[in-house]
Image (cartoon, grey):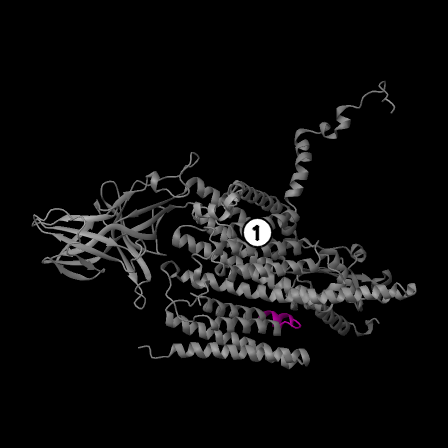
Amino acid sequence: MPLPNMSSPLPSTSSLWPVANLKLPERLMVVLQPVLGTFRSVQLAVVLLALLAAATIAGVVLPQEGNVDVAQIQKQFGPNYAFMKQLGMFGVFSSFWFITLEVLFFFNLLIGSFKWLKPAWLAATQVAYVPAAVMALKPAAHSLRVKAGADVQAALAQAQAVFKRHGYHVHVNTADGQLYATKGQWSRLGPCAAHLGILICLLAGVYGSFTGFKAIHMVAPGGQFQIPSSAMFATNTPQPWWFGQIPTWTIAVRDFRMEHYENHPDVVKNYYSGLDIVDGQGHLLKRQTISVNHPLSYDHISIYQASFAPSGRFKVTVDGQPRLLELNQAFNQRSISVNRLSDGRTLIMFPFFANQDPGVTQDHAVFFVLKKGEGDLPQGTMPETLKLLPGASGTLKGTHITYVEPEMQTGLQIKRAPEVPWMYLSFVIISIGTVMCFFSQRQVWLTLAPVDGDPSAGHAVMLHPKTNKARLSFRREMLAIEAALVARLTSANPSERSG
Amino acid sequence: MNTFNWLQLEQMGASAGLLLVALGTLMYVLHVLLPKPWLRLTATIIMGLAAVSLMASVAARSIQAEFFALSNMYEALLICTIGLLVAFVVIERWFSVPNLGWAVGFLALIMLFYGGSLPTDITPLQAALRSYWRAIHVPPLLLSYGFFTVAFFSSVGFLVVDTKQQGALSRAMLRESLLPADGIGAVGGTGGGEVSAYNADQSNSGGLLDRSFTGYGAVYDEVTYRAIAAGFPLLMIGVILGALWANEAWGNYWSWDPKESMSLVTLLGYGVYLHMRLNGEHSPRTLAWVSVIGFLLVLMTFVGVNMWGFGSLHSYGAIET
């Protein structure tokens, strides 16, 4: 192998790498151009949409931690669990690769939208005349089987009437013998609008995560709380980068009630929490009863009726006096309520729940009454008891007891979402954009070319139709327009019909 | 005092709807054998009347239930059938699509018969679903499913026609290879200078071949696109309304609920179709296959999620027997 001629001068670095000759912004563009080209391609959009769809299906089909107990997932997947967890398959929507796909999708939308915006805008707003000579070269240009007369203005007026009847916006250039007709031009902006809406939606979501918060709190009637308690924060617990505001006022729960269907008393129809918003001095700022689908809004914060659960207290009446019994002692690993009554009697209650206790088919409570001097609850022997369903009454050792119901506590979700107006705006834009996409832009260029280069001999009519979608409908429409043009121009100039 | 018998109206509406769909389907089958325009027009009108009749049934049921009747699979199928019939009648009047009526009719019959075999009792709604949002969130979704179903049938029609044409073209090319050179011009003609001129433009801008842009194939291809283009905004609006409702009711726009997620997948799937179509680099055959896949996603969203036990807030579609 011959050695290189060492006497010849070495090529300069700049000739080896032409970019070195460029200025910094130009160099940057050389490097960025292929990246931008990739990011704005429709092919990448197709690939990303397909990958996001596939990933979402994985998130639906595979059990996701947070929705399903981890131990159950481990049991289901056995030795494969660790590997699949490493891949993020049990938390698809928060996995690094799903978020990466979302970020790529964001940039594809952003850069792609900019690419299409200018051409779409120009197509929607510009009147695009094409010179006759250029038109003649276009592969789709073809002449009608009709020849217009020498009067260009009259022929264009006839053609204009035809296109207007088909709903076209018509622009006429009499000097050059041209007509440009278009309709549905604003539909070209539909994809850009839809993309813009999605971008605003994604950005609004990011803004919300920096400034909003969501807290969940269970509270029994009569209770109150302030929001700044870290234990209350749900998924988006404030992070170091969070710069939103947490209110200082207090939420007090006046009451909570549930409504059941008349024909299905076991099904909850709705539930209601009476709420007071109170400031630091105890002044009432707002009072409202909320229910599912009807939140309270105050100071840019919404309080939602989210759930309910037993509070651990039970409403009873003892000899006609209402009492609220709390679970205050344990007996055989079971929480019970032991209450001293005024005359030295002791009322003991064991609550049982169908959804908690094996073998129990109906919620109920078992009561014991110990008279003064009878001591504690006897071990081993079953004393005289009273079993009551909610709403039922009975008498035990001369004590009249009504088990009203277990007290329920209300589950409130408190949310500050400053991004909401942006979200609504983005949704409106997306909706309008996708509806605009349904329509197609139709463009027709009509040119009158002098027959044999002599205007006095008449003009041949040339058409160049173009659409971006809905080709068959356009073709049908163009056939109708052509027929109308032939009829109009022939009737205006009957001797000039060509064969 | 409410003395009107809404239950009777509901049952009459459902029965009349079923009979009308059966009659319309029969007429479409007859139209295949005896292609008379009046037969086709009558069949389309009957399908439209069937949709109106089923709407009356749903309205009467909703009045009895005191909420928009969409709380179980029977009601979901009833409303989805209405969406299918409405979408079909719109497309049929627009394009006069060949051989689509009988296929849609048979599917509507299957949906109605299957729905009728499920429990039809009015079941109470859980508190979260008692909202006017449900009445505006669900109909666009089910109407979009109707358009996607029409797109599916149209895609299948395209694939059948295209496969036949490909076979005919191959046979013709084989025959011509045995003929003198001047015989080649007769193959693959599009029939007319005007059509050729348009085809030249279409193939430049959209990548469509002359072969597929003529005859039934062109109609099926365009109907598929138009049906998806009509269904996509409806699906998008339905999903967006659902997100707004979720935020209004629970303070969350999106919670990756299985039904939500599958709606998103369907949206992404048809987004792929529309991008591929606009890109113009894919054959109508490829696009038809994407449309078929999109319909499978619709099926998975509508029945699959509930059938396989993924449902949660959207458990209205649960199948109870």
- Residue A320 picture location, percent across and down: 12, 58
The residue depicted at 39 percent of the width and 52 percent of the height is B250
Q: Circle 1 sits on which residue?
A: A53
- Residue A56 picture location, percent across and down: 54, 50
Viewer-closest of B154 and A18: B154
Three-letter amino acid code of the residue under disc 1: Ala
Quadrant into which the N terminus of chain A falls: top right
Residue B283, located in which quarter of the rendered image?
bottom right
Quadrant into which the C terminus of chain A falls: bottom right
The chain ID associated with circle 1 is A
Label 1 neighbour load within 10 Å: few <14, some 14-19, many 20+: many
The residue depicted at 58 percent of the width and 65 percent of the height is B149
Q: Is residue B241 above or below residue B8?
A: above
- Label 1's element? helix
Residue A27, located in which quarter of the rendered image?
top right
Viewer-closest of B44 and A355: A355
In the rendered image, residue B94 lying in the magenta stretch gets the answer yes
Left or right: where B254 falls relative to A358: right
- Residue A288 picture location, percent across and down: 28, 53
